Amino acid sequence: MDMSDIRDKIVPTNDYIFKKLFGEEKDKIILISFLNALFKEYDFLPYIEDVTIKNSETTKSYDVEKQSRLDIKAKIDNETYIDIEMQNRTYFDLIDRGIYYCSKILAEETVKGRNYKYPKVVSIWIINDELDSDNPHFKRKNPIEVDKHITIPGAIDKDYILTSDKVTIVYIYLKKFKDGLYHEEIENWIKFVNNYENYNTYDAGIKEAKEKLSKLRYDDETLTVIKSIEEKEMDNEAEKYNSHQKGLEEGEKKGIKKGLKEGLKEGIKKGKEEGLKEKSIEIAKNMLKLNVDINIISQSTGLSIREIKSIEI
């Protein structure tokens, strides 16, 4: 992959780059500026002076429970948490997933005692996707939509339902954005995230974000990670296609629907076992040679920390 092609992938909507821009404590002026611009448009929270960026990996209540990784989790005062998610693909369960993430934060951050004290949660979903007409989000006309008084299934007891004014979910639809709908501060931020060329950078936070993005485009570690992510995605797509084709061929040989399903299943299983694991180890080995942080390697390759530590370089 040519280096200029890799640099073209270093944009704010890339998951890894988004976290580097908005999710690092040392550059939290970027996150503070973005949040204040958004909250100025929707005054459900006061002006933010400071934030504390938290570990974005939610804990499990039980071993069998799904563990989720938030893109960015931050605390802005003693009772308010922020979750920010960048979504380049809009799945049908997106609304339910947003509620699930909020319920996890509520469960983890509630002060337990004689009287339970629930925090406030603001979940911000930035959606960079063209929406199909049958998608629940398609009917929403505004680039920014705010849902309040969310009905939340209990995080531990699934039969318990909570209708709470403690939770607000904000959806920002990048593809629906047009000039002149909102005040200048939030419009400049949406333009930045959308990778527009022209927007005002008089705000200290957005100026810092632009400068950081420029540096990331020439940072060796960032280039290595983005290249690895892109190669893994291309390999995944190729494996899916090859597995699908093999499944079809096997199905055709058997001539029955059962044969098609079994052939496809075997093709996918074999492709994953023989191709993806080997490629992930190769990528991890190259990243280890460059002294890339082991957690970043794990996120980029899908390998566990233990597997990465066992690789000989």
Image (spheres, rainbow, N blue to C red):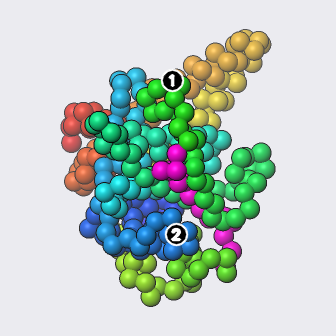
| Region rendered in magenta | 164-179
Q: Label 1 sits on what residue type?
A: Lys
Residue assigned mark 1: 270
Residue assigned mark 2: 43
Residue toward you, 251 or 87: 87
Q: Label 2 sits on what residue type?
A: Asp
Residue 175: x percent and y percent? 66, 64
Disc 1 or 2, which lies upstream in sequence? 2
The image quadrant of residue 126 is bottom right
Alpha-carbon neighbours of circle 2 within 10 Å: few (<14), some, or many (≥20)?
few
SS at badge 1? helix
Total numbered labels:
2
Residue at image coords 64%, 18%: 263
Q: Is any atom of residue 251 visible in this view?
A: yes
For this view, does 30 lie left or right of residue 256?
Answer: left
Vertical position of residue 307 compared to residue 186: above or below? above
Residue toward you, 188 or 112: 112
Residue 211: x percent and y percent? 38, 78
Vertical position of residue 247 compared to residue 37: above or below? above
- Is the magenta region chiefly helix, strand or loop? strand
